[in-house]
Image: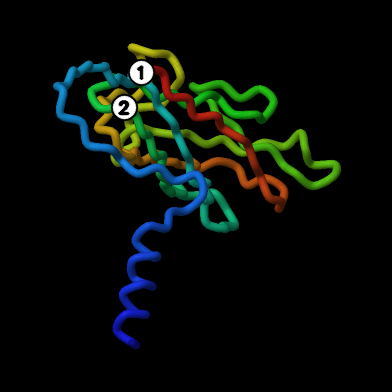
Amino acid sequence: MKAIGSAAILSATIGFSLPGATLAQVYENGSSTATFNVSLTVQANCTIAADPLVFPSTGLLSAPVNQETTLRVTCTNTTPYNVGLDAGTATGSTVANRLLAGTAPGNTGTNVGYQLYQNAGRTTVWGNTQGTDTVGGTGTGTAQALTVYGRVPPQAAPTPDTYQSTVTATVYF
């Protein structure tokens, strides 16, 4: 009798379906097909990120003070690009004559000259004019590191202070 009860429960369970569920039917009269396209357009694009450039603390500026930093450019694969650096935010700063401005009250008109270069020898100024003084490359789809070489040349020592400028790095593509 116990076996009969189990078979009855099994039979009832097989016939049970969840609300909203449909069972796939099997048809044998034929079939028809359709195709559809799937597409994605990838456009040329680039992003840029920059680490700060912090020169080491110094007293007299009787010898060059060198430091470097890194830019990271990520462009779609095969996308050509140029990276430019502007003159910075210090009043009177130009690409040819970059300046750091004092930050202490009463000293904001005092400047320290510095320069940014494309090469470790610090002979090629890095500017913002495409085809003239920017750094070019071709995207790979992953971040590419570009080194910026900075130098504060020997000059008369200014008032002790923290001297700053904000340089904008632009990727053109």
The N terminus lies in quadrant: bottom left
Is residue 39 or residue 151 the one in the foreground? 39
| Residue 40 on image: x %, y % | 33, 21
Element class at badge 1: loop
| Residue position for label 1 | 43
Total marks in image: 2
Residue at 65% in and 29% down: 89
Residue type highlighted by circle 2: Thr
Vertical placement of residue 32 versus 18, above or below: above
Residue at 30% in and 23% down: 136
Q: Residues within 10 Å of mark 1 (few under 14, many from 20)?
A: few
Q: Which residue is farthest bottom?
A: 2
Residue at 72% in and 37% down: 110
Vertical placement of residue 25 versus 35, above or below: below
| Residue 92 on image: x %, y % | 66, 22
Residue 34 numbered tag? none
- Where residue 93 sits, quadrant-wise, is top right
Is residue 163 or residue 12 the one in the foreground? 12
Contact between marks 1 and 2 (CB within 8 A): the answer is yes
- Where residue 113 sits, quadrant-wise, is top right
Q: Residues within 10 Å of mark 2 (few under 14, many from 20)?
A: some
Q: In this image, 125 relative to 52: left or right?
A: left
Residue at 40% in and 26% down: 46
| Residue position for label 2 | 76
Is residue 111 or residue 1 the one in the foreground? 1
Element class at badge 2: loop
The C terminus lies in quadrant: top left
- Where residue 147 sits, quadrant-wise, is top left
Residue type highlighted by circle 1: Gln
Dot 1 or dot 2, earlier in sequence: 1
| Residue 94 on image: x %, y % | 56, 21
